[in-house]
Image (cartoon, rainbow, N blue to C red):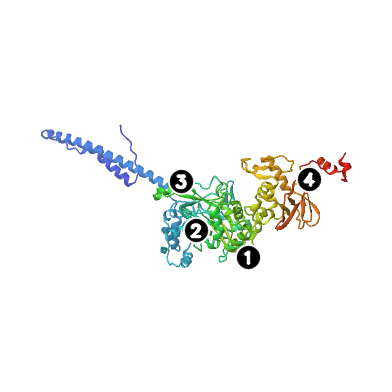
Amino acid sequence: MPQLLLVPKNTKMTRLVTHFLHRGMNAERSLPVQSNGQSFQKYQTAGADQLKNTRMKNWIFKGAAVCLLAFFVAGCRKSTWDEFYAKPDNLAKPIYTVLKERGNFTNILAAIDKADYTRTLDAAGYWTFFAPDDDAFKTYLAEKGVSSVSQLSAEECRNIVTYSLAYYAYKKDRIDDYQATTGWIADQAFRRRTANYKGVYEETSFAGTKMKAIGANRNNTGALNFVVNDNNYKYIPYFAEGFMKAKGLNASDYNYFYPNTAYTGFNVANAQVKEADINAENGVIHIVDKVISALPSIEEYIKNNSDYSLFRNLYEKYMVSYVLNPSITRNYQVMNGGAEQVFTKVYNSSLAYSLNNESYLIAPPNNDAQQGSYSIFAPKNDVLQAYIDTVLLEHYNSLDDMQPSIIWDFLNAHMWQNAVWPSQFKTTFNFVGEEARFDPATNIIDKKVLSNGIFYGTNKVQDANIFSSVYGKAYLDPKYSMMTALLNLELRSSISNIYNNYTIFMISNDMFNAAGYTADPLVSTTVIDQWRFTPPPGSTAAAVTGNSARVRLQRILNLHVIPNKVLSSLSESDIAMSYGGEYVKYSNNSVATAGNLDSLGMPAVVSAGENAKNGRVYYANRILDFSEETVGQDIERLGSPTASPMNFFGGI
């Protein structure tokens, strides 16, 4: 059956295929044929052999033609594929090529090469690149005391290139919008995640132990402090006009951190954007006038600044632990050989955040670091030491002797889970709900926008409520630990508020014990119910434990708290209403409640008083007790003596 073979017209391949087919199909026609009978046999034999060979050649020619045709068809398909999917002629070139063709980026290109990021920036991707030009590098190299990028280390180059390289492509009109789960929220972002991260590093603990460590990439919740495959990427700050206006900020807020850089409406760290929105195949380029190297985290900054070594030591000694990280250990050993283990550096879960965590709070969709950052106020060594000596250690021999909660409360008072801008100290509240009690002009000696937060070095401590209020008088004295534990159940937030006034009659552990109250862990597995009441001699009250004992104690505690009133003197005779609604009588530096008068007729004698920011505390020799008697029993007791002026009434 004849076969139909279609080949394209007017191509070299057409002519080549036709040539092979023609030769194969007509090969038999060239056989030698003789009509001479004598010669016929000879030529018949020769012709048969040639025919056999010719037919074989025919098949070879046909096969070759088919192969050539298949090759041609495949070539046509590839050509069509390439034509369809090929880069359009008007498509922008990759970031690396765009910078190369511009001609004034030789230094950043050299840094890219040395950092081994050439393939990344000269290939497909989706980046924002803040590119310093050669003028910016000229200044940077002079500051470094070198003349060429070749004199910079590969690590220095990586810290420049990777920190200037932000994930995803953002033009100027979109870069200050926050990518929330509900979509874009305009003018709420001032940071973007970069390709820069720290990884495993050499660490020495406060005790002097050397190890391989990696930073926590989550704030410690008690169960979670590290997520595998999260590199704890650093963020780069920028200041766009829309964000600044939306947050009520202006040039003075920017220049507070960067006094030598003019605010233009689009600044990246301490640099101005000279030209924005340069399109590239793999992202967007913004040209900046300064070289921006990777900023340190809060942890890294205070580690490398000796002015804050005492502040840092409070974290390192009391708030840091090292937890074996099996996944990172395994990866590290595979990559580097050996048997060294890697430990996650973990901060106490009671802290506002981990100083080494670059990922912020990780609210959905896990990119909340675009619109938020930490802030910290770090007192320099001399002022911190003075505060420790005069306030925290007033009743302790050393920090080692006090309960850890005092240290984390002190640190949390200096930590904010949000950005504290210079013009907004009074309206931005820390982890414990207090404004920044610093004067931006006189109390701040150092200020930095870092990779995971804002840092302020200070010449004073945050005057925290918890230590400066009437609550602090009990909290900072171990002789009043039972009273502190009871205050923590209900009254702590109220009486530590420096904007509310109180008078407190202090109850020492000895006074509680003398009244029959102790704390015993054998009573209950619940800490707040580990109380025991054993009536002292002469008392008619029944012995109780656990919750029943706690109820008695809370009533006693409430008798010692006078709200909304500061009794500056107890020398005059008067009464006051206690927090529990019962009356307290005072006169000539003696104080009594119904229980004091009922049982023994013995008031509490006040020996001293002390002022706090929100009131005054008094120290007495015994507790103020509630009455164990009913009203009827009171009347009977008072009216029974015949000489009593209430005898007639009491005898009814």
Q: Quadrant of residue 527?
A: top right
Instruction: Please report contact status of discs 2 and 1: CB closer than 8 Å, yes or no.
Output: no
In this rendering, the label closer to the viewer, 3 or 4: 4
In this rendering, the label closer to the viewer, 4 or 2: 4
Looking at marks 2 and 3 on the same chain, the residue that comes earlier in the sequence is marked by 2
> Label 2 vs label 3: CA separation?
26 Å
Q: Secondary structure at mark 3?
A: helix
Three-letter code for the amino acid on which mark 4 is drawn: Asp
Q: Could you tell whether 9 is left or right of 590 in the image?
A: left
Residue at the right extreme of this rendering: 648
Q: What residue sits right under mark 3 in the picture?
A: 327
Q: What residue sits right under mark 2 in the picture?
A: 294
Q: Quadrant of residue 61?
A: top left
Between 100 and 90, the residue placed more toward the observer is 100
Between 233 and 411, the residue placed more toward the observer is 411
The dot on residue 598 is 4
Residue 465 percent location from the top left of the image? 66, 55
> Label 1 vs label 3: CA separation?
48 Å
For label 4, the crowd category at 10 Å Cα-Cα, with few meaning under 14, some 14 to 19 and many 20 or more, is some
Residue 204 percent location from the top left of the image? 48, 55
In this rendering, the label closer to the viewer, 2 or 3: 3
In this rendering, the label closer to the viewer, 4 or 1: 4
